[in-house]
Image (cartoon, helix red, strand yellow):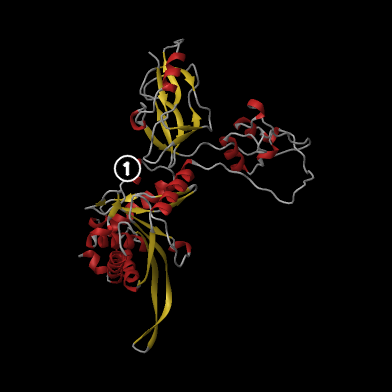
């Protein structure tokens, strides 16, 4: 009997997925475990495998198409089986729990393959198809490949439905004759790039956070001389190189245990207080930010925090994180010190009640007992959800972080 395959929910924030590639076509024989497609979520591109045997009877979404969670993307059954009634029923059925709607396994893969580059020749003017709104008709995947190759999508002739530009048009662009030079009525230009699933989710969640959680900000300057000296000594003795960010993660985790009312989430009718300190670490990737989590950071030595942080950051950049890597944070750190930023404010990462923005450590002149000396200082800004954390509570938390970083030996006790 034929069965529908639906778009799965691959993360807790996913609302739709983009078909990056189909690895099977209609009529192909499918075995359990075969790779059917690659799907781009809001956090990664993941493999989509079958748990069933059968023939692929129907594909309901083309490459580059965004599909809502729990929508039908394919039908699998016996060769020649009539699936249209089943397809109509599935399309009209109310949405069920997306997390259990699909028989599939998910694993991280790299981004969709890029089309190869080739030399261009040009003799004839380009032909483009424009929609009623004045925008060029092109699939998201075609636009993505064109951007990666530095091709102006407006110069490509579309061969899809109603002249729509599709992937094959971009890949064959360099065999299409083009004008070497064309007069233009404008002196500049622009490019519309569709938002990735990750960027859409970042926009939605941070807008919800900023406009629903009343933010207030507390700033503090921390002397980093002792932490820098301790780091130097540790790195001389250990093969695992510890960063200042590792010290900050440890100090924040210990400060959360010392100030447990900061380690919380606003849940509407109640505040949830956590007995563990799971630190989210904001990592910049090509499409935005991901926040892998170092669990129970207060209980881990700096060497283990360092190795976990490096591994998570690299997997994030390679788009190889699994859902278990980014779920369960109770507090988030955003560190832009390595990018030469003195100080900044950050938007709270739900469901956390606070986020710490960290600037760079820099040398400044200070006056101590009438003597001018140099010292290393670092500025931090704590963003708090005023519904759950008040000013005095946030200030006490910052004082604890300051105490640990200015006396790093206390983090080892």
Residue 90 percent location from the top left of the image: 42, 21
Residue sitting at x 48%, y 23%? 24
- Location of residue 212 with respect to 380 vertically, above or below: above
Q: Say which of 81 and 56 sits in front.
A: 81
Residue sitting at x 77%, y 47%? 185
10 Å crowding of disc 1: few (<14), some (14-19), many (20+): few
Residue 368, quarter of picture: bottom left
Question: Which residue, given by chain and number where applicable, does mark 1 sit on?
Answer: 324
Residue 276 percent location from the top left of the image: 23, 53
Quadrant occupied by the N terminus: top left
Residue 4, quarter of picture: top left
Q: Say which of 216 and 229 sits in front.
A: 216
Residue 56, quarter of picture: top left
Quadrant occupied by the C terminus: bottom left
Residue 39 percent location from the top left of the image: 45, 34
Secondary structure of residue under mark 1: helix
Image position of 2 (left or right of 195)? left
Q: Which residue reaches farthest front?
A: 269
Image position of 48 (left or right of 133)? left
Q: Is residue 216 visible?
A: yes
Residue 322 percent location from the top left of the image: 36, 41
Q: How many marks?
A: 1
Q: Say which of 7 and 303 sits in front.
A: 7
Q: Which residue reaches farthest bottom?
A: 370
Residue sitting at x 77%, y 36%? 125
Q: Say which of 226 and 17 sits in front.
A: 17
Q: Is residue 83 visible?
A: no
């Amino acid at each position: 009997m034929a069965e529908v395959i639906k778009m799965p929910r691959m993360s807790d924030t996913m609302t739709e997925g983009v078909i990056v590639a189909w690895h099977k076509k209609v009529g192909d024989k499918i075995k359990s475990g075969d790779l059917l497609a690659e799907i781009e979520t809001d956090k990664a591109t993941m493999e989509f495998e079958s748990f069933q045997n059968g023939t692929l009877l129907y594909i309901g979404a083309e490459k580059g198409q965004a599909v809502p969670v729990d929508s039908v993307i394919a039908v699998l059954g016996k060769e020649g089986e009539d699936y249209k009634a089943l397809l109509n029923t599935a399309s009209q059925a109310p949405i069920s729990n997306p997390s259990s709607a699909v028989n599939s396994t998910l694993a991280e893969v790299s981004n969709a393959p890029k089309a190869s580059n080739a030399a261009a020749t040009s003799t004839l003017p380009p032909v483009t198809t424009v929609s009623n709104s004045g925008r060029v008709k092109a699939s998201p995947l075609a636009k993505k490949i064109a951007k990666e190759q530095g091709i102006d999508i407006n110069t490509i002739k579309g061969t899809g439905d109603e002249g729509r530009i599709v992937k094959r048009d971009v890949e064959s662009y360099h065999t299409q004759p083009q004008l070497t030079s064309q007069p233009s009525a404008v002196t500049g230009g622009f490019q519309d790039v569709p938002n990735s699933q990750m960027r859409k989710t970042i926009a939605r969640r941070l807008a919800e956070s900023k406009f629903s959680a009343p933010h207030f900000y507390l700033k503090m300057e921390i002397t980093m001389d002792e932490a820098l000296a301790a780091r130097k000594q540790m790195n001389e003795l250990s093969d695992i190189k510890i960063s200042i960010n590792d010290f900050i993660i440890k100090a924040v985790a210990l400060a959360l245990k010392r100030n447990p009312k900061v380690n919380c989430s606003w849940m509407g009718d109640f505040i949830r207080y956590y007995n563990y300190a799971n630190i989210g670490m904001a990592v910049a990737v090509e499409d935005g930010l991901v926040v892998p989590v170092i669990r129970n950071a207060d209980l881990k030595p700096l060497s283990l925090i360092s190795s976990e942080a490096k591994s998570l950051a690299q997997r994030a950049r390679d788009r190889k994180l699994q859902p278990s890597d980014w779920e369960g944070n109770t507090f988030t750190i955003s560190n832009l010190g390595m990018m030469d930023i003195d100080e900044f404010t950050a938007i709270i990462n739900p469901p956390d009640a606070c986020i710490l923005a960290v600037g760079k450590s820099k040398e400044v002149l200070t006056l101590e007992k009438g003597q001018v000396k140099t010292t290393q200082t670092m500025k931090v800004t704590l963003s708090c959800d005023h519904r759950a954390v008040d000013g005095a509570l946030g200030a006490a938390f910052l004082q604890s972080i300051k105490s640990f970083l200015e006396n790093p030996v206390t983090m080892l006790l």
